[in-house]
Structures are given as C-alpha cells and as structure tokens.
Image (cartoon, grey):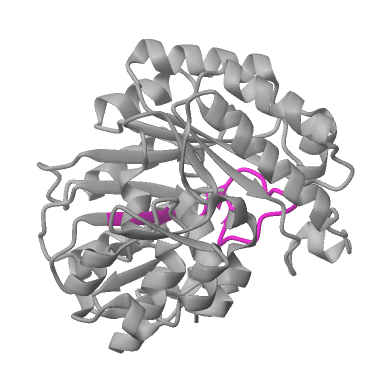
Amino acid sequence: MSNFAYFLFFMQRNGIIKMVKVVSGMESVYIHIPFCKSICSYCDFCKVLHHGPWVTQYLNALLLEVNDRYNGEPIKTLYIGGGTPSSLQMKDLKYLFDILKKLDLRELEEFTFECNLNDLDERLLQFLFTNGVNRLSIGIESFQEEKLAFMERRHTFSDALQVMDLARKIGFTNISLDLLYGIPGETLKDLKKDLDLFLKLQPDHISTYSLIVEDHTKVGNAGIIPIPEELDASMYEYIVSKLESKGFIHYEVSNFAKEGKISKHNMQYWNNEEYYGFGLSSHGYIQGIRYQNTKSLTSYIKGKWLLKEEVLSKEDKMYNEIMLGFRKLEGICLKDFFDKYEVNLQEVYDLKGVLRQEEILYADGHLFINPRYIYVMNEILIKIL
C-alpha cells in the first residue's frame, strides 16, 4: 500500500475528500498506475489485473491528461504509485517515462517508484536508477507464511535480501518498505518476528499499516473479523518503541524514517499543500480546489478523467489543516497556520480542554498530539473539531 494511497484512505474514511481543476504553483506530482499481476485479498484501492492492450490505452490517456492539465511548473517531488507500477512491461515503462518528460524535472529532489518485490530484478532496477528514480517503495507487508497466504502474496526473506542487496549495489540509497500487521490470528510474537526481519534488511524508511477490513474486497466479502482493538494498540505501541530504539524518526502516525529520509512527497500531503494528481482515481489539490479522477478505466481511457471537484472555503482548508497536520508528530506550526489563514489557530478551535488534559502539547511554536495518545488521535480530533 502506498503512502499516497494511505492518505486517500484516511481522507475518505473521515469524509473530507472534496475535489479539482488544475492551475499553477505546484511542486509535486502523483501518477497512478492501476495495473497488478494479482489482486491482494485486502486491497481496496483502485486497481485492475494487468492486460497489455489496456495498459497501452491507459498510457495514451495519461499522456493526454498530462498535456491537458499540467502547466509547466518545476516539479520537486514525483511519486508513481498504484496498483503496481512495477507490473508494467519494459516497453510500457519506457512509454511511461517518455510521458514524464512532459514535466519540468530540472529541480526534482525526490522521485519515488512503487514496486512489488517479485517484480524487481537487475534490469528493472537499473532502468529505474538510470532514469532518475532515487527512492523505492517496496510493498513487502510480511514474511510470515500464514500472513502471506491470507494476503494472497508470495515471497521469502531470501528474496527480499537479494533485491535489497542488488538495489544498494546499483546505487539506491533511499528504500522504503511497507509492513502490514493486525492480520486475524496474528500474535504480538508474530509481529516481533516480522519487524526483526524488516530491520535486518536495513531500510531507510518503513510505513506500517494495520489491516482494515473493507467492503468489496475478498477479505470483506468473506466476513473476516478484525483483531481486537487492544491487540492492535499493543502492536502499534511495540512498532513505535522498536523502531525508535533502532534510530528511526517517528514523523507521522504510520511512517518512520532514518535521519534525512523523511518522505518529502508525503509531507506535501500532511502539510496540506497543493499537488497534481494524474491517472485513474487520482486526487489533486490546486488553488483551493480538490478533485478526484474517475475510477472507471473505460471512462478514463475515453478522456473523461474528472469524477468530482469542489472549491474549498477557508473553513474547509483550516479543517483539513487540522486533520492532516496533527498526523505529523511535530504537529502544526502556529506561525505557518497564521501565515496561511491570517487567523490564530486558537481563535478558531477551542483547545482549552485538550491542552488541560495534556492530550495536545505545545513546544517550540508547534501544537502536537501527545505521543502517549497518538493511537487515539481521532478521538482527540473529534474534540477539537
């Protein structure tokens, strides 16, 4: 699951996706590649099984959308997510990277490409590195056989070790791994084994996600019951403690990075800044307008990209700033909030109760959720909003 995808889930879950017409002043681009070689049992994101003719038609439409919407701004962060971008055949990858030449990437700082572990070989890794990708996001999720069977995935720790070694030799110095936990039947001991193996791979960044049973997935259709919340909380607390003890910075609720490896692209979302979203189901935020592209592959290929858009009021923007900003462990900078909205945050929202209870803390010009309560942050946000 991509960091962008998790962002979309969080926004949708809280009912605040309101969507866009593309204009200017952008520094970030997200491009969605919906194709997968197989569908994971738990996945609720926009995806279709890989089919060659569809891929060609899709990339043709993507080129038209980029030409139509992009306004020539210098781009500093680029994220190719999915789906499974690494599922594309080499000829399609070359086409995709030709499309990227439409963007002004002379000031590009971070270029993330999402990969499935089983797709990565020397040829693909060398192609990505040669063409400017400087950050890999690899969806490993787990090494436990029972968990992998549940997810309908197949790989081993040995596979991951070989890929990581190869990627490092080629020159990649920024590799993020996804860890999924909270699978029915999983114990805290199982999670500890998984996390130990993840750490042996020496990643630069780890994104962690607790399983959420969604409708219209294989897991949801099977009536799977989520693990008890107490166990979920214990797993989360263990992950935070373990990763921090190994030198990872816990910078966002679900994300951990080594020094200097915080995702610049994802921070664009958490800071409630604007960005382009291209491709099927993509979301974007431009000049106060949020938009969502269609989830219909047929409509997208026909050039009917836009599903919905909405102009946000000042109140909407501040609301989103709270919802997203408090996901960061550093919280919200009061000066930045005032510079954006010309009003003090404390004048808009009543924080007396949460400050008195020390659920929200203040330090160095920032308001942030007390790390002791980060697991129940949604309850705190409800009090504020």
* Residue 234 as seen in the image, left or right of residue 207: right
Q: Which residues are magenta?
A: 29-49
Q: Residue at x 54, y 23 (%)?
A: 246
Residue 252 visible, this orientation: yes
Residue extending farthest to the front is: 356
Q: Residue at x 33, y 62 (%)?
A: 278
Q: Quadrant of residue 151?
A: top right
* Residue 120 as seen in the image, left or right of residue 227: left
Residue 304 visible, this orientation: no
Question: Residue 272: x percent and y percent?
Answer: 33, 66
> 207 above or below 370?
above
Question: Residue 32: x percent and y percent?
Answer: 42, 56
Nearest the viewer among 315 and 27 is 315
> 329 above or below 121?
below
Q: Residue at x 40, y 23 (%)?
A: 125
Question: Residue 215: x percent and y percent?
Answer: 75, 69
Question: Residue 192: x percent and y percent?
Answer: 74, 28
Reply yes or no: does residue 253 show up in magenta: no
